[in-house]
């Protein structure tokens, strides 16, 4: 059974992410992880899809992302809320201020001290540390805690809202 993070868990995770320390090697660390976490939680994207995003995959006019050749080599468009689009725009503006490349082919989640994007393992390691810090633990009979649980949580929370609003019944 995948772990479903509660809405309260999600808020605690986001708060802890925003408290991450920036460093000379990673001056936007809290901003990067915050934008990444919000993107994963609001869209249900896979971590590998988010990390492979390039700036030119963001359609600012139509508020969508182009996910290229993902699982089973398919591409798709993912719509974004206006709040998530603003989060990405603000994040990219911060990158300009600290001189992290913003060319069209640059990764959205550029690792500032390596060429290319953050690695999945680096993101999972940071996410695991945050979960331990705020006391979220694996439940008996569930899979180990991982960032992919945000995908399941987004889908579950969306279904709960539809049910609450009387949709699809």
Image (cartoon, grey):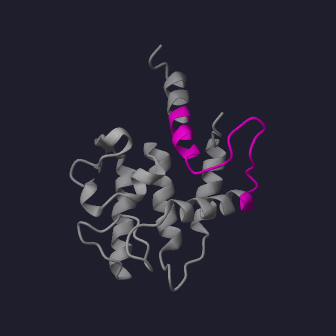
The residue lying at 73 percent from left, 62 percent from top is 133
The residue lying at 24 percent from left, 60 percent from top is 56
Instruction: Give the percent coordinates (x, y) of residue 149.
Output: 58, 44
Look at the image and give the residue range highlighted in magenta. 132-156
Residue 147 drawn above or below residue 35: above
Quadrant position of the N terminus in the picture? top right
Residue 121 drawn above or below residue 100: above
Q: Nearer the viewer, residue 20 or 48?
A: 48
Furthest residue in direction top, as rendered: 169
Furthest residue in direction right, as rendered: 140
Instruction: Give the percent coordinates (x, y) of residue 17.
Output: 59, 63
Instruction: Give the percent coordinates (x, y) of residue 7.
Output: 61, 43
In the rendered image, residue 143 lying in the magenta stretch gets the answer: yes
In the rendered image, residue 3 lying in the magenta stretch gets the answer: no
The residue lying at 65 percent from left, 55 percent from top is 12
Instruction: Give the percent coordinates (x, y) of residue 106.
Output: 30, 68
Q: Nearer the viewer, residue 52 or 168?
A: 52
Furthest residue in direction bottom, as rendered: 24
Left or right of 100? Residue 104 is left
Furthest residue in direction front, as rendered: 72
Count every numbered label the image shows and give the total.
Answer: 0
């Amino acid at each position: 059974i995948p772990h479903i993070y509660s809405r309260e868990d999600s808020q605690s995770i986001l708060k802890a992410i925003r408290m991450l320390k920036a460093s000379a090697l990673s001056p936007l660390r809290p901003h990067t992880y915050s934008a990444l976490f919000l993107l994963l939680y609001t869209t249900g994207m896979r971590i590998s899809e988010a990390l492979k995003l390039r700036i030119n995959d963001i359609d600012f006019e139509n508020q969508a992302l182009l996910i290229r050749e993902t699982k089973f080599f398919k591409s798709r468009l993912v719509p974004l809320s206006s709040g998530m689009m603003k989060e990405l725009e603000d994040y990219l503006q911060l990158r300009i201020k600290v001189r992290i490349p913003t060319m069209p082919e640059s990764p959205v989640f550029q690792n500032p001290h390596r060429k290319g994007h953050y690695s999945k393992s680096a993101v999972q390691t940071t996410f695991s540390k945050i979960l331990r810090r705020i006391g979220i633990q694996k439940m008996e009979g569930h899979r180990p805690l991982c960032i992919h649980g945000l995908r399941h949580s987004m889908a579950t929370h969306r279904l709960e809202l539809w049910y609450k609003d009387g949709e699809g019944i």
